[in-house]
Amino acid sequence: MRLKVLPLTLSALFASSTQGAESGEATLTLGAVTVSAAPGPLPIHTLLTSVDILGGDKVADKNVTHSWELLGQMPGIQLTETRMGTESGKATFRAFNGEGYINGIKVLIDGIPSNVNSGNQRFIDMIFPLEIEYIEVVRGTNDPRYGLHNIGGNINIGTRQGGNYTDGRLSYGSYNTREVQFAVGRESNGFAQNYFVAKQDSEGFRDHARSEKYALGGKWFYTSDDNRIRLGLTARLYEHAAEEPGYLSAAELAAGRRQSPSKNANDGGDRDMQQISADLDWQIHPNLMLSNKLYYNRYIEDRRITFTRYAAGNAPRQRRQWDETQSGLLSTLTWRAGKALTLDGGINLERQDNEYRRYRYAYGDPTDFSAPPARVQNDDQHTFNNAGAYIQAIIKPLDGLKIIPAFRADRFSGNTRLNTTGVSAPLQDSGWINQPKLSMVYAISPGAHLYANWGKTFQVLTGSREPAYLTGGQAAYRPSINTGKEIGIKVSPAPGTEARLALWQQDATDEVANMPSTGTTVGLGETRRKGIDLQVTGRLNEQWTVWLSHALQEARVVRAYTSGGLSLAGKEVFSTPRFITNVGAEYRVDADWRLGLQGRAQGDYYIDELNAKGKYGGFMVLDASVRYTLTPTTSVDLQIRNLTDEKYEYVWYDNFFWGGNDQPMFSPAAGRSGYLSLNLKM
């Protein structure tokens, strides 16, 4: 993999403190993270390598249209910016793209699984910036805590817990964007209450892109006087209604980046989500800890979309409806057997009861989705059940050396009923999917840690029909097994300065590009992803802080199935840029003024599986911010996004895996935009 010389972009994401550091860890912490004394599972940095933790102080004042955008500030994160109403985009890493065909990143909110059935990350938008306490990103295959969707790693968004605060943020900006966020925390005598409400309205950068959404949340936790028992309840509600401007052809893009074609005049979506969880953490003995989470997720969406052009009679306009319910349990038991040994194990159970309907229309422009459909392609009900268990040991045979062997196993079951035909079928039987793992960290010196890890994860098929379910004549699919390995070093050459360099590789068997919502499945064969991650943070003095990350990555098909009679062997996996870069600087003029520059860059990528239709999608985006503190409780900030008015787009190929219009299609990103915010702490 050849290192490219890149123009630098800037980012105001910096390492201001690393709290709770333990000898042997290889974690980088960006911003301030509060360490809780309440009972709970082992901290993530004591268990795993290649972990990044972003403090809430680095996201609370960010103006974003969707919360997944916040992750673009973290090292090596690729953002897939589709920006089609409620289906707005997602964050991925380790050369897994965000197209929706291979959903390789597990998402959690306060430790609760928060992917939809397909693996997409729609629950992230339930959380607004002011509610976030921290964001954890775990890269690679060595985390045994999770199975389903945890192919390349996981993202956990932790929200504010406890404390005494009343915070508000009012924002107004480009495209008539209005946003209010309000967070309250109260804690006394062991009882903590946290409340959050947010509302955002925007006309959008493009025509026919209006968006209205709100979120409501509450957390109630009780900790016993002896700090041995903690009981908690969390509830969230989210609603989003948005118009979809549609994709543009190259000719339409050249004619006007902000236009919406007339065929998309009735496109849009309505999304409702709820999440409820109950926690019980019990310090059974000073050396024995039990943690439990019960959860319930509900996802409902009605999306109306129009494709570019299909053959006559193929009804290009679609109405897709999802109604998914997830209920589950996560339970972990941790035993600190001694100074040199800790054992940690757990189980998870999840049941999904899902419905998916797809109606197709064949009308002129604009489409009337209230009229009867030309045909019903999907009217499906399916269950999807997962049982998993893991165990790991944290062994410290020598001072400065930590060895963590682990093992996880998962099994899946379920059934589907296709109401259009009356067919019922069971889920593919994968048996128990075994996943051994091993991590090691060695302290070469107090300021240098060498680490390595190896592990297996898996991909199973989801959706409501074949090939996930064995409908008539469907061949068996084996799970795709991913084997990852990594070696890295973290150093702290001077106070306030940290750096980490990692080399990694991940090989998959029988990888499948699977899009349940369209019934599209293509076997890719054996794939290899590999890369180099470099991260540096430094506090130069009391005023200046700088930060840099550069990720080189590659995803290729090694041994392939065929596409249209042509082998994919040697081809790059589509929509995967070869580099992702973030660079940043912050300058504190005095106690009242703070200036920042922030940004990111990524390379071009192939848009088709045969790498024959050209490369698109590269960009460099620079943002700027100024904050002025009026009083100890009041501040204002001005943020300019895309300061240089970079013209860039998300690009896909509309003939991808199905008969379409055989051309690239574009979703333009917003140009230069500004936002003014008032921050209140009462």
Image (spheres, grey):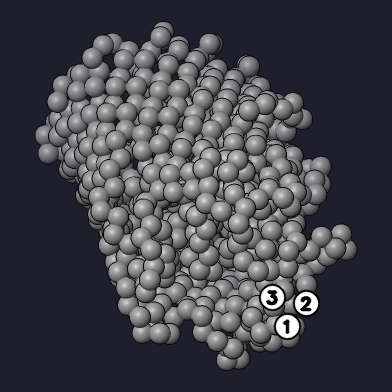
Task: Pinpoint residue 171: horizontal percent, then vertical percent.
Answer: 65, 54
Specify few, some or many for label 2: CA neighbours under 10 Å numbering under 14, 14-19, or 20 or more. some
**Which residue reaches farthest left?**
285
Element type where label 1 sits in the image: loop
Note whether residue 27 is visible. no
**Which residue reaches farthest right?**
255
Task: Pinpoint residue 548: horizontal percent, then vertical percent.
Answer: 63, 27
Note whether residue 152 is visible. yes
Specify few, some or many for label 1: CA neighbours under 10 Å numbering under 14, 14-19, or 20 or more. some
In the image shown, does 545 or 568 lie closer to the viewer? 568
Dot 1 or dot 3, earlier in sequence:
3
Dot 2 or dot 1, earlier in sequence:
2
Q: Nearer the viewer, mark 1 or mark 3?
A: 3
Amino acid at the residue labelled 1: Pro
Determine which residue is flagged by label 1. 366
Determine which residue is flagged by label 3. 310
User: Do the residues under discs 2 and 1 have CB atoms within 8 angstroms?
Assistant: yes
Element type where label 3 sits in the image: loop
User: Do the residues under discs 3 and 2 have CB atoms within 8 angstroms?
Assistant: no
**Residue located 61% across and 31% down the image:** 552
Q: Which mark is residue 651?
A: none
CA separation, marks 2 and 1? 6 Å
**Residue located 67% across and 63% down the image:** 655
Amino acid at the residue labelled 2: Ser
**Residue located 25% across and 18% down the image:** 396
* Location of residue 458 with respect to 507 vertically, above or below: below
CA separation, marks 3 and 2? 16 Å
